[in-house]
Image (spheres, rainbow, N blue to C red):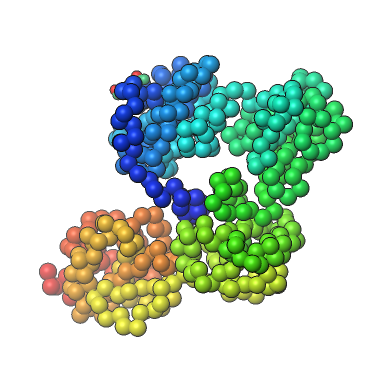
């Protein structure tokens, strides 16, 4: 789940800006809706009759879904004129009766778009753009053959976009096992990359033009710019493609062309090193080349590298609790969630700091609010830096609320927790506490905080459990009394009732 949060923090930053209401835009278009509404009662039947269909799972209250409405409708209108026509459909996944359907498709966020082929027997993630023209061209490509033939230099020019990954198979003839295997790989990975095939390598912009194949040439907008493969086993070729499409250094800025690589970066199982620097910084080129050298050096060593423009990275800064005056900075997050920080780094420091990290000489860093100087309110304030002492070393029974400052249910709960805390004020064995889980790192692997507020109880002897019951004052007091360590002598909280 952490990975999902990260990716969305990085990529939703722009999407969130300017998400206006869509009502005004769609009112004056004609009343016919081109997007087909489906629900649990007719989904299978309708999808079953289509060789290719796009389905959006949405929730009416979701901002990104609202933003998509006019774009999706416009795309549906254009695609209804396509030969053959392509249908775009939608399912309200928040509707109680459609929830089973949504879970069959493993829908975790909104909007999620899926491409369903052959009556729904093949399901693929939609990974294309979210505005009308982009949807149209992506869907057209997806509904055509998995690999497009390149017959002329015009074809090649139209097809090979230098900002994207393009994979072209060169074959003397378009048949045989190798060609079929190439096509199978194209079918498997078509959501992510554009595939083509040709019998004339001279049409291609880079690489040896005298080859007659079979050879697979992968073009990429970074590093060595192209690479040739002569592997035709389906799994092995797919793996080579996936590896070759990870940049030595992933770039994160406002350019949407880079975003698919950012997603890959976060999905990788490696430790993640991120250098945040202002791309207009005078020393930017020097940062870039030094960082690149380090990334080359650690290739294949379970660590991936990203360089991010400070201007585009507010979401990441918030997530990690970083400040702009700490930039340029490097932060490394390992798989177990530990973070290591080098603030105000200079180009010449990068290599030695990464080496120190690798050698285990750097201490992890925790995001924490300052420890409060006075902590005398009934509900005690926890921060990352006093958490261990107050929760685990205090020998008390502690009820902990994990909250977010913007969360409405947390605000409702606040006065109730206050009352609970007051009722235990004379009980030295019980503490009621809260922690802003957006401003502080919470101990990894100990607490599952999936939403706010989340309440946990830690008994004096260290037993840990989540409070799932009612949230009235009485419910919470009862819960504490039931679960506190019986060793604790008195129960004044209960007596006061
Ligand atoms: C599916 O059922 C819903 C609810 O009855 C309806 O609004 C929608 O138009 C139906 N779709 C199709 C394609 O029949
Ligand atoms: C084609 O792929 C299949 C299945 O992955 C594999 O067994 C076969 O060896 C491949 N053929 C060639 C020529 O690589």
Q: Is residue 367 above or below residue 218?
A: below
Please indicate, yes or no, whether residue 139 appears anywhere in the rendered image: yes
In the rendered image, residue 255, in percent from the top left (x then y), is placed at 56, 48
In the rendered image, residue 60, in percent from the top left (x then y), is placed at 32, 38
Q: Is residue 426 above or below residue 295?
A: below
In the rendered image, residue 285, in percent from the top left (x then y), is placed at 68, 62
| Location of residue 443 (image quadrant) | bottom left
Q: Quadrant of the C terminus?
A: bottom left
Left or right: residue 55 versus residue 32 is right
Residue under the image location 75 percent in, 24 percent down: 152
> Between residues 252 and 28, which one lies in front from this camera angle?
28
Residue under the image location 30 percent in, 30 percent down: 27
Q: How many marks can you see?
A: 0
Residue reaching furthest to the right: 210
| Location of residue 95 (image quadrant) | top left
Left or right: residue 357 versus residue 69 is right
Residue under the image location 32 percent in, 59 percent down: 406
| Location of residue 392 (image quadrant) | bottom left
Residue reaching furthest to the bottom: 373
Q: Is residue 162 above or below residue 400?
A: above
Left or right: residue 373 versus residue 496 is right
């Amino acid at each position: 789940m952490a990975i999902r949060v990260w990716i969305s923090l990085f990529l939703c930053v722009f999407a969130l800006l300017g998400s206006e209401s869509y009502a005004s835009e769609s009112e004056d278009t004609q009343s016919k809706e081109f997007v087909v509404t489906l629900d649990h009662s007719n989904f299978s039947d309708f999808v079953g009759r289509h060789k290719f269909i796009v389905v959006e799972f949405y929730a009416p209250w979701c901002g990104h879904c609202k933003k998509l409405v006019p774009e999706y409708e416009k795309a549906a209108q254009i695609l209804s004129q396509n030969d053959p026509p392509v249908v775009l459909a939608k399912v309200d996944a928040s509707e109680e009766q459609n929830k089973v359907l949504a879970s069959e498709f493993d829908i975790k966020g909104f909007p999620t778009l899926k491409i369903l082929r052959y009556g729904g027997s093949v399901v693929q993630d939609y990974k294309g753009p979210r505005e009308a023209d982009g949807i149209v061209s992506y869907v057209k490509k997806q509904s055509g053959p998995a690999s497009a033939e390149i017959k002329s230099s015009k074809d090649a020019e139209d097809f090979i976009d230098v900002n994207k990954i393009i994979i072209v198979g060169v074959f003397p003839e378009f048949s045989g096992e190798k060609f079929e295997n190439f096509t199978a790989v194209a079918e498997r990975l078509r959501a992510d990359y554009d595939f083509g095939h040709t019998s004339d390598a001279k049409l291609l912009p880079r690489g040896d033009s005298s080859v007659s194949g079979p050879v697979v040439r992968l073009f990429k907008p970074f590093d060595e710019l192209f690479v040739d493969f002569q592997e035709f086993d389906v799994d092995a070729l797919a793996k080579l493609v996936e590896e070759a499409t990870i940049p030595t250094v992933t770039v994160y800025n406002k350019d949407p062309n880079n975003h698919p690589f950012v997603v890959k970066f976060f999905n990788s199982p490696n430790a993640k090193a991120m250098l945040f620097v202002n791309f207009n910084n005078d020393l930017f080129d020097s940062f870039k080349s030094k960082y690149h050298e380090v990334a080359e050096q650690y290739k294949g060593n379970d660590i991936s590298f990203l360089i991010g423009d400070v201007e585009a990275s507010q979401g990441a800064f918030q997530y990690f609790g970083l400040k702009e005056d700490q930039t340029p900075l490097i932060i490394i997050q390992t798989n177990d969630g530990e973070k290591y920080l080098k603030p105000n780094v200079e180009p010449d420091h990068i290599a030695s700091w990464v080496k120190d990290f690798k050698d285990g000489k750097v201490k992890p860093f925790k995001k924490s609010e300052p420890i409060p100087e006075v902590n005398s309110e009934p509900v005690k304030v926890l921060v990352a830096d006093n958490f261990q002492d107050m929760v685990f070393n205090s020998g008390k029974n502690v009820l902990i609320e994990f909250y977010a400052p913007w969360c409405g249910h947390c605000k409702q709960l606040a006065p109730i927790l206050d009352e609970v805390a007051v009722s235990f004020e004379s009980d030295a064995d019980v503490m009621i506490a809260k922690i802003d889980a957006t401003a502080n790192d919470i101990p990894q692997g100990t607490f599952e905080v999936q939403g706010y507020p989340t309440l946990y109880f830690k008994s004096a002897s260290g037993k840990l459990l989540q409070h799932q019951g009612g949230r009235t004052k009485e419910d919470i007091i009862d819960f504490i009394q039931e679960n506190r360590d019986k060793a604790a002598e008195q129960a004044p909280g209960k007596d006061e009732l």
